[in-house]
Each structure stands twice: as C-alpha cells, then as structure tokens.
Amino acid sequence: MFLNAWSLALTLTSIAGIVLGGIACRTAIRVLRHWNPASDSELQIRLEGEIWLSSTLVAYGLGFQIVSLILFVLAADEFCKVIVGAMCATGSLLANSYGMPALLVKLVGVFFYGFWIVLHQLDIRSESYPLVRTKYLYLLLLYPLMAADVTLQTLYIAGLKPDIITSCCAVVFAAATGGGTNLLTLGSENLQLLLYYLTMVLLLGLGGLLLWRWNRWLQALYAVGWFWFFGLALVVITNVISSYIYAMPYHHCPFCLLKPEYHYIGFAIYGTLIGGAFLGSSAGLVEPCKRRAGLAEVVASYQKRAVQISLILLLLFAALTSYHYLLYMASGGEV
Amino acid sequence: MNSALEKHLNILDYALSALWRHRLKNGGIVVVFAAVIFLVASFQLVTTALTETAGKVLAVTPEITIQRMSAGRQEAIPLAYAEKLHDIFGIRAVVPRVWGYYFDEVRGANYTVLGVSADMPQADELSRAVVGGVMGSGGQGKVVVGRAVSQALQLQPGQLFSLFRPNLSLKAMTVAGIFRPETDLLTADLIAMPLVEARDLFLIPASKATDLCVYISNPAEIGTIAEKISKLLPDTRVLTRPQIQKTYQVVFGWRSGFASVCLLAALAAFAILAWDKASGLSPEERREIAILKILGWETADVLAMRFWEGGLVAGLAFLLGCTLAYLHVVFFGASLFRPVLVGWSVLHPALSLAPHVTLKEVLLLLAFTVVPYLAVTVVPAWRAASVPAESALSG
Amino acid sequence: MLIELDSVSKIYNQGQPNEVRALSEVSLAIPPQTMVCLKGPSGSGKSTLLSIIGCIFAPTSGRATIAGKALARLPDRFLTVHRRATIGFIFQRFNILPALSVVDNITLPLLPLGISPKVRRERAVILMDQLAIRHREHFPAGQVSGGELQRVAIARALVNDPPIILADEPTAHLDSRLSSEFMQIMADLKHAGKTIVITSHDPLVTEHPAIDRVVGVKDGRIDVP
Ligand SMILES: Nc1ncnc2c1ncn2[C@@H]1O[C@H](COP(=O)(O)OP(=O)(O)O)[C@@H](O)[C@H]1O
Ligand SMILES: [Mg+2]
C-alpha cells in the first residue's frame, strides 16, 4: 500500500534519514581511518570540519526519527480505516508481522541517536576530543539500525493489504490478559499498579540519593531502574491506565491516547516517559567516559543535570498517568 | 538568564535580521515553497475530506448485498430469496432495496434512485442526513433529494414534481427534504424514497427488489456467511462490504496516488531549487561568514544560524501554504482539484468539503514538505559554515 | 609574557602539491601593554604570524602561548572560544558588513558570548561616544565616511574588552591624515593597558613614537638586522 499519503510521507522521511545517515557514515569512515590530532595536514583540518557536519546530520536524523516514530503510529491509526477488522492503530500494526518490530526499532532508534548526541556533546567539551573514535564507531553501528528501520517499515507497508482481516486491540489484549505466554501478562491490575508505583517511588528515592551523594553503583542502578520502568510503564499504560483515560473498561490501547479525542495526552505521557528514560539511563551509560582525558568534570555535571531533569519528568509523568485513575477513584468508582 | 540560551537567542536574532536583509531572495523561496505546500496541503485536505465522506458511505453500506444475475446481467431479485437465508447463523437482518439510475433526457443527467424499506437497520443514519423533512415519513410519493438534483430540477421542500416511468406514464412526487451539504459526495445526485415508491417508479413487482441487503453482527464472519449465501442461492452475485471497499479503494487510491506522484515531482523540483539556492554561496556571503567566524562565531553557531534561517523560511512557507490551502478547500471547494478527484457522477456535484484538521494532518504535511527541505539544505549549510575564519584576513 | 611564540612554524596545505611554508621556527615574546609592529614585504608571513597570535589557527609545529593558553593543535572550537575572549581584530579595509547598521557591526563579537541586547547596546554606546561616532549609530555601515568606518572597526575590536588588539595592515588604504589619527587612537589604547600588534610596512606606522618594538619579518623568519 505505497500509493497512500502516509506511506509516502514515511518513506520520504526514511529516505531523507538514510541519505543523511549515509553522509554521516562517510565522515565516520574517514575519521576512523585518517584521524590524527597531532597532524596539521589539509586532511586533518577537513576532518575537524566534518565533525560539525556529522553531528548536525545526526541531530537532524534524531529529529526525523522522532517525526517518523510519531508518523508511524499515526499512519497505523489511519490505516485501520482501510484494513478490515482493525479498529485502531494496534490492529493495523498487527496486520502483519513487521508492524510491531518496525515500531520497536524506531523507538530504539530515538534512544540511540540521542545517546550519540550526548556522546558528541561531551566529546567536544574536551580539547583533545577523546571520544572521537568511540563516537564514530558507534555512528557506523547506527547504520544497520537505520537500514533495519527502513527495511521493516517498507516490508510493513508492502504487506498491508486492505482485504486482510486482523483483530482489534480489545481482542488482542483481552486475549493476552486472559492467559497465555504474552509479555503483557503481568498478573492482576492491582499487582501491576503496585509494581508501577513502587518502582516510581524507588526511582525517586534513588535519584534524590544520587543528587545528595553521588555513587557509581547507585548511578548504574538508577539507569537500570529506568530501563525497567520504561518497559513496565508501557505495559501498565496499555493494560490499566489507558482504559481509565478512555473511560472504557475494555478499551486497552497504547496508541489512541495520541488522538485529539483525549486531548493529545499521549504526547505528554510518552514525551515525559521517553525523555525521562533517556536522561535517566544515559546518566549511567556515560560513566565510562569519565576516565577519558578532560571529561571527568564534564561528565559529572552532565550526570547531575540529567538526573535532575529525569526526576522532574518522572514526577510529571506520574501526575499525567495517575490523574484519570485518581479521578475515577475519587468519583467513587470501585476497583 | 542562562548565557547558552541567550547566545541562541542572539543567533536567532541575527538570523532574523539576515533574512530581512535578503528579503527579496528569501521572499522568493517562501513564495515558491508556499505554493508547493499549498498544492500538497490542498490535495491532502481534499483526500482527507473525501475519505471521511467515503467512510460514512461505507458505514451505511450493508455487510453483504445480494443481486440476482441472469445471462450475466442483473435482474430483479424475488423477496422469497430472503426466506432461504433464515437458517444461516449470524445474520442480523435481510432487507430488500431498490437501487437504480434514472436518466433525465431533458437535462442529460443521471440521477441515482434509492428505495429503502423502513426496517433497514441504518435508516436512521440516512434520516439524519436530511434537512427539512424526515426520510420515509409515510405520505404518498414523499422523496428526499440531493442538492444537485434539487438544483437541476429547481426543487424546494414541499414542491411537487414528476418523473417518467419506463412506460412513459408520469409519476408524481413531493420533495420531503433535501440532503445536507456535508454528504454531497454520496447524496448530490440521489433521490431517496420508500421502497414502494421506487418499485412504482421502475415498475418492479411487489414481490421483487433490485437487491437484498444482508446485515451481519460480527464483521469477522462476513466472508463465511457470503460463501454460504452464494452456495444457497447459486443464481446470485454476492457482494461483501470489504469487496466494495476495496474496489472503491483501488479507484480512489489510484487517482490520489497518481496525483501524489505529480505532487512529489513538484516537491522534488522545489528541493532542487532549494539545494541550488542554498549551495550557491556568493562572495558577499562567504565574506560575511568569514567575518563572523573570525569575530568569535563557532562553526556550530553559523550552522545554528543557518538552521534558524531555513526553519523560519520553511515555517513561514508552511503557515502560508496551509492557510491558503484551507481557504481553497473550504471556501472555494478545492476548485483546482475537482477534475482529478471527483468524477463518478455525471452531475459533478458542487461538493462542499469540510475537512477535519487535527495535529495528525499537520504532522503529515510537515513530513511531506519541511522534512525534505531541511534535509536538502543541511549539507550546503555546513559548507557555508566551514568557510575558514582566516579568509577574512586576505584582502 | 602575554604572547609567547617558541619555534613556531606554519605550513599551509600540508601534504598537498600546493604546500606553502609560510613561517619557519619563529620565536617571539611580547609583554603586556606594549605596541609591536611586524614589518616586512608582502608575502613574508606577517598575516600568518598575526593569525597565530590571534588564535585563528594553531601552528603546524612549535609552541604558542597566548594570554596564558597553549595553542598546540587545539581544535578550532577551542581556538574560537579563546579568541573571542582575548583578541580584538582590526583588518585591512576593516571588514565591516555594509548592510548592517553601525551599532550592529560593533556588537557582532558579543553575539556568540551570549550577551543580552540591552547590555550589547550599552557597551556599544560607551565606545561610540568615546570615538565620536554616536550620531552614526543607526546608519548602515556602508554609508559612513572612511574615517568613521575606521572608528567603527576600532570600536568593534574593543567591544569585548580584549587584552590584545591585532591590526593587519590597517593603514594600507588610508590617507596620511586618517593613518595618523588611527595611530593616535592606538597609542591611547596602549596607555589604557592594551597590548597591540600591528603588521605594516607604512613608515607612518613603523616610525610612530608609540611603537615599542619593530619586528622585521622576511621569508617566514624573524629578520634580525
Ligand atoms: N590560506 C593560505 N593558503 C595557502 N597559502 C597561503 C595562505 N595564506 C597565505 N599563504 C602564503 O603564505 C605566505 C605568507 O603569506 P602572508 O602571511 O599573508 O604574508 P603577508 O601578510 O606578509 O603578505 C605567502 O606566500 C602566501 O601566499
Ligand atoms: Mg598580509
């Protein structure tokens, strides 16, 4: 189903991304082969200039990736109109086996591009550019991810046939919670909520502790905690929170939150969650960079700032996701 | 205030003044870009509006339609066929319908005639589309007409008019109401009336109809039920909603796809223009950037300035193009696209389109227009930003 | 020493067929609050030397320490950051952007420092008053006279209050009246505590009484007479 505005827009964004990525990778290869900070040769001077090109390209790449991610979900929501049986984005994404993987790769892409930019920002703060090689090796590794993204997306779009009958989200997730080995089964609603709020409190405590007294192990734990919380939050939003927002007990869908009917609350929810998870985990991931020349202080100040902002985002996220649930409880609904 | 933020504001400030200084050149780009965005956005808005309307059509289409075929042509179907379907589990209702075309020789126009029985499950939805009257509200010869028909025949609600039966006798009818403009796509050329009236107009015997509509509770069962029906009634053609939907999609998809490709070509042409404009660095521009750099602007600052310039140009063009497109579609009925998109009725209904603009549409348009523009200008921006500072010294 | 060069060499286009050795093993030390003139024929390497002092690029080899910072193979970004805090430039033909107003030209070096518009203007006003060009504040710089343009260039070099002022053949396109006026302003600046390096082969400059030292440059070397 390529002759469709959404498919075309997705493809166009991907092509733009992959071309820019290709140019960035060309720089990466040149830097990895010829980088020599001691030299004053023409080549070295050109390479130093190309660092700005590649970082700009990756920054644009991140922007395009975010657009592409949102576009993909919205496109899925649009496709459900022509796919028989699908009533919302979940149904369209499940219409063939490439939808969910493509979404996942896109999401992972946002994190990976973001990490590269963090790495770059840290690197250019030290006069010796100590992370140049690491940074460009990492950039080269991003290319397969880009390729996977484009491939999965193309396969997904190609595999969409208006006459294929899929099931709707209510069916999918109802079946999943009904039993079986689905990832989304995590016990009863109360148990999930308990786990969810417990993790949140733990993260808040850990973050506070870190700000008060920094410790490498706590920092690592905080990063791991965010990864865990990210996954958990997605499950809990799908299984529990979404239906309170929709005010429909059997509507469990992580994507309809993005619709205007719900005041685009999904953008705020996922924005704070992704932002928080990104900053929280990156603060731990940059720890090894501290050992590089001239970076100890820079990294430490980044970590502090990242933890601070991630805590703020966590609080916002908590408020956004709990609001409807609390409203429901306060208005006398029973659990 | 934070000095990094202040620095960015300063760069933005400078970018704004630079845009203003080169207002002729930038104005030209904005105008061309806005024109491209206008085309893309109008097209997108029209497609969205039509798809929305089409969605409404399909919503009132029964899950399965049965037509009787004889010698490869459609014939009136006996109502008795409906009884044979009683045993099939999953059918909610079977309702007869008359669906035909009336050729008006005087005006050379085709009208669609729809005769519905009052127990049709979606009769309500049809009624809601009517202004100044109720669908099928008893009374002899009461019909509801679409706007195009009312204009062609100069009909007002309550007015009497007549059409020829196949035997050239006249059938008199009263206009009970007119369909709402929002449903023009479907109803412009439609004359809807109770089943009996339609039978009378086409001289179809009371025991027959043109087709039978089968309503089904669970959409997942459409396929199996359709199969059972065609086994039970071998001399019929069984059309399912997904099939109709698909045919519609193919026709509509092809048209819109073709137009999209044309628009993409326009976009590509613009991208080449943008690339060309952005990469041709005049001696004055080179000198300016060299001076900025020697005075302490980093490469990243010049890049940021170029980004702001590009972003402002794109943003302005986007706003302009989208606003014009909205006006074009809503107030001028998308007059530029009419011939490409609507063509299924001889009457060329004077469609009134009311597209729903949400964040979704805006994002789609952004991806179509601003993303390629930014992508195309990034490398030239970097080229400009890497003019060496020392070139300000020579001469 | 405020400026210290130790066997500094600069090779342009190193590793290319068009390689040029512009400076060879130059050593030079300049203490604060002095005015030095680099004198030599065209193509001798004066501008290149000035560029290294001005942190525009790092030397190919050798050590350069400018206002306490060693510049050996420093990436461009750090040179720029150091340059905008320590150096004020005055160019041959002044390199003023003619479409911008006088005040906007003067405040250009303050933009990347993240200084707010209000403070920018305050600083520019003080300098414009000192240099008697206040009445030209909102004129496009392309429309002011040669003498005023010269003072706009000086104001721009001073606006970030740098300890070092560098001027590359500032009098090459000026008549003798404007040249002496220029040197007079430089002399005043030296007394106000600035360190000034001027490249020139104009006798009005090289023989000016405020010049503390004339350094001969020839074929990329310091020419010891
Ligand atoms: N950017 C450059 N690339 C290549 N060669 C250069 C460059 N700048 C200057 N040169 C060469 O370096 C030598 C010294 O130049 P310069 O420092 O400008 O001398 P001066 O300012 O005394 O005239 C000259 O031979 C000149 O051609
Ligand atoms: Mg020179």
Image (tube, coloured by chain):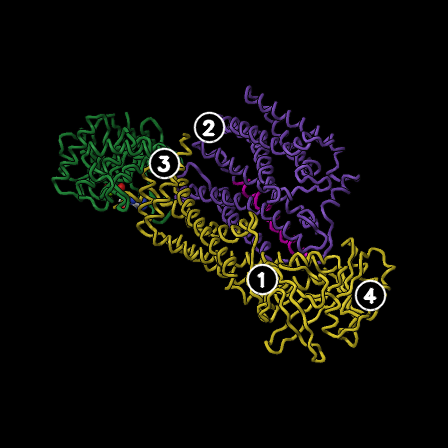
Chain colours: A purple, B yellow, C green
Q: Which mark is residue C112?
A: 3
> Are the two marked residues, 4 and 1, in contact with CB atoms closer than 8 angstroms?
no
Residue flagged by tag 2: what amino acid is it? Gly
Report crowding for label 3: few under 14, some 14 to 19, many 20 or more residues within 10 A (C-alpha). many
Residue A97 shows in the view: no
Residue flagged by tag 3: what amino acid is it? Pro
Give the residue pinned by disc 4.
B230
Q: Which mark is residue B256?
A: 1
> CA separation, marks 1 and 3?
49 Å
> CA separation, marks 4 and 1?
34 Å
Report crowding for label 2: few under 14, some 14 to 19, many 20 or more residues within 10 A (C-alpha). some
Which residues lie in the magenta part? A136-160
Q: The N terminus of chain A is located in which quarter?
A: bottom right
Left or right for A106, reference B325: right
> CA separation, marks 4 and 3?
77 Å
Residue flagged by tag 1: what amino acid is it? Ser
Residue at image location 69% in from the left, 74% down from the top? B171
Q: Nearer the viewer, residue C37 or A156?
A: A156
> Mark 1, chain letter?
B
